[in-house]
Image (cartoon, rainbow, N blue to C red):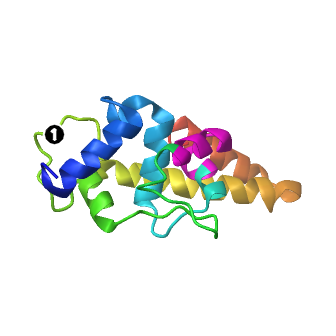
């Protein structure tokens, strides 16, 4: 394809999301960032916490992009090929002049991983510790929120 594998991915994403790319809406970007930055294929249910997007919306997004981010019988979302995540993040590709909206800046990965950690902690507190939540947990979550970390 013209533009190599990057050209192929760009055409596919244009087909899925139009010219605005991943910036079509914040939910789409959050879901795809969560999948790309996860150390292992996330469960669809985990994406609710990791992306902070409702499950119904996640399912619509995943249905649209299932060719590049397929969901399998184990209910995990996989990256079609490592070259796709590399291309999105610019790992090994010169994307410095690319303003297509199909780019994930890894500088935001630290912030994303922080969001992951907070989502995990919040989920744990809300599910496992629901009956024994301590005031310090509430204070910690409030502090995190005050610092725009959740």
x, y percentage for residue 74? 64, 70
Extreme-right residue of the structure: 131
x, y percentage for residue 127? 79, 57
Main SS of residues in magenta: helix
Q: Nearer the viewer, residue 17 or 107?
A: 17
x, y percentage for residue 121? 64, 57
Viewer can see residue 103: no
Does 62 lie within the magenta span? yes
110 left or right of 142 in image = left
Does 43 lie within the magenta span? no
Q: Is residue 40 above or below residue 21?
A: below
Q: Mark 1: few, some, or many residues within 10 Å (few <14, many ≥20)?
A: few
Q: Is residue 130 above or below residue 100?
A: below
Viewer can see residue 7: yes
The part of the chain drawn in magenta is 48-63
Extreme-front residue of the structure: 1
Q: Nearer the viewer, residue 12 or 143?
A: 12
Q: Is residue 59 above or below residue 45?
A: above
Q: Which residue is mark 1?
A: 98
Q: Nearer the viewer, residue 36 or 67?
A: 67
Which image quadrant is residue 69 in?
Answer: bottom left
x, y percentage for residue 65? 46, 48
Q: What residue is drawn where x is 37% and y is 53%?
A: 109
Q: What residue is drawn where x is 66% and y is 44%?
A: 55
Q: Quadrant of the C terminus?
A: top right
């Amino acid at each position: 394809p013209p533009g190599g594998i990057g050209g192929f991915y760009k055409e596919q994403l244009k087909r899925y999301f139009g010219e605005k790319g991943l910036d079509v809406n914040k939910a789409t970007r959050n879901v795809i960032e969560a999948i790309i930055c996860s150390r292992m294929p996330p469960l669809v249910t985990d994406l609710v916490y990791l992306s902070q997007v409702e499950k119904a919306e996640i399912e619509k997004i995943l249905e649209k992009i299932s060719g590049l981010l397929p969901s399998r019988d184990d209910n995990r979302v996989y990256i079609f090929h490592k070259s796709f995540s590399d291309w999105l993040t610019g790992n090994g590709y010169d994307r410095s002049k690319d303003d297509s909206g199909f780019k994930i800046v890894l500088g935001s990965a630290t912030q994303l991983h922080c969001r992951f950690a907070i989502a995990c902690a919040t989920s744990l507190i809300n599910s496992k510790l629901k009956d024994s939540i301590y005031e310090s947990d509430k204070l910690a979550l409030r502090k995190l929120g005050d610092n725009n970390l959740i």
